[in-house]
Image: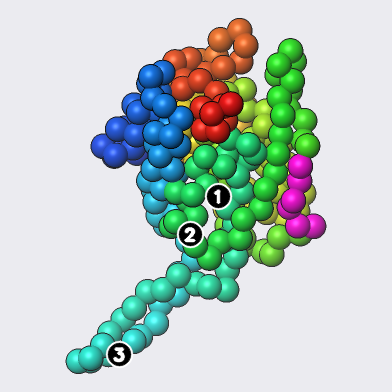
């Protein structure tokens, strides 16, 4: 069976509301941060559906035994924000995955070549088998940063089929590149935009997510 990249845009009114807030040029930094936190929360909620490992067991209610389902605590779950903009979605994701380990990786993009270079890598040498990894990256524009981050994960033993990316807006260019490189990957986004401008920014997009989040 041929694998194909899966991209979901959940039709949730809260996701669409906070996307509109984040896009608006008049949104101040404090409200923009709130919008990103909420988008991180609701996109994570959608992304972890049918993804988290579970255990089936039996418990006793005050009245009788009852079948029960729990999250399996023996399977590692990781949230990996791609710095620095990925931090904007972290609080929302971490609120739903409070026991997840947080590993940081940082990339800076050359504004002339649009190629990423890594300036910080706090990933472990190896990940345990079956580790679930949720990547937070507000914008998938050219796809270069996400492809580089995926390469670091796979080098450390992560199965790309167990990786989810949550992103606010994505461009067709990034989706095409990720599909070619990692067809078993799954992405959850608030919106798929038209394309990129000459500077490699998503249009209509939401501007520089890092600058707008941190007020710089």
Q: How many badges with numbers are in the image?
A: 3
| 182 over 57 or under it: above or below | above
- Asked whether, in this view, residue 67 is left or right of residue 93, the answer is left
Sequence-first tag of 3 and 2: 3
Q: Is residue 176 visible?
A: no
Residue visible at 33% across and 37% down in the picture: 15
Residue visible at 71% across and 60% down in the picture: 127
Sequence-first tag of 3 and 1: 3
- Please state, as top left, top right, bottom left or bottom right, where the N terminus lies in the image: top right
Kindly check if marks 3 and 2 are in contact, taking CB atoms under 8 A apart as contact: no
| 159 over 176 or under it: above or below | below
The mark found on residue 134 in the picture is: 1
Q: Which residue was labeled with disc 2? A: 97
Q: Is residue 122 visible?
A: yes
Give SS at disc 3.
strand
- Residue at the far left: name it: 63
Tell me if residue 122 is in the magenta stretch. yes
- Residue at the far top: name it: 198
Kindly check if marks 2 and 1 are in contact, taking CB atoms under 8 A apart as contact: yes
The magenta stretch spans which residues? 120-125
Query: Dot 3, crowdedness within 10 Å: few (<14), some or many (≥20)?
Result: few
Residue visible at 29% across and 39% down in the picture: 14
Tell me if residue 15 is in the magenta stretch. no
Q: Which residue was labeled with disc 3? A: 60
Main SS, magenta region, reads: loop
Query: Dot 1, crowdedness within 10 Å: few (<14), some or many (≥20)?
Result: many
Question: Marks 3/2: CA distance?
Answer: 26 Å
Give the camera-side residue of 9 and 115: 115
- Please state, as top left, top right, bottom left or bottom right, where the C terminus lies in the image: top right
């Amino acid at each position: 069976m041929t694998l194909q990249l899966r991209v979901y845009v959940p039709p949730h009114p809260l996701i669409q509301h906070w996307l509109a807030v984040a896009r608006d040029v008049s949104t101040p930094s404090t409200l923009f941060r709130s919008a990103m936190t909420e988008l991180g929360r609701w996109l994570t909620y959608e992304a972890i559906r049918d993804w988290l490992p579970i255990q089936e067991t039996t418990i006793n209610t005050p009245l009788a035994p009852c079948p029960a389902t729990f999250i399996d605590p023996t399977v590692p779950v990781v949230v990996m924000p791609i710095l620095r903009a990925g931090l904007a979605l972290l609080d929302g994701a971490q609120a739903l995955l409070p026991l997840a380990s947080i590993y940081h990786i940082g990339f800076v993009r050359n504004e002339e070549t649009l190629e990423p270079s890594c300036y910080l890598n706090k990933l472990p040498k190896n990940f345990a088998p079956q580790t679930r990894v949720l990547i937070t990256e507000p914008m998938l524009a050219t796809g270069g940063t996400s492809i580089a981050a995926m390469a670091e994960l796979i080098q450390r033993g992560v199965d790309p089929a167990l990786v989810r990316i949550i992103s606010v807006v994505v461009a067709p260019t990034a989706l095409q590149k990720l599909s070619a490189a990692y067809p078993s990957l799954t992405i959850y986004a608030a919106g798929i935009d038209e394309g990129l401008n000459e500077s490699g920014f998503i249009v209509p997009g939401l501007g520089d997510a890092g600058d707008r989040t941190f007020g710089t």
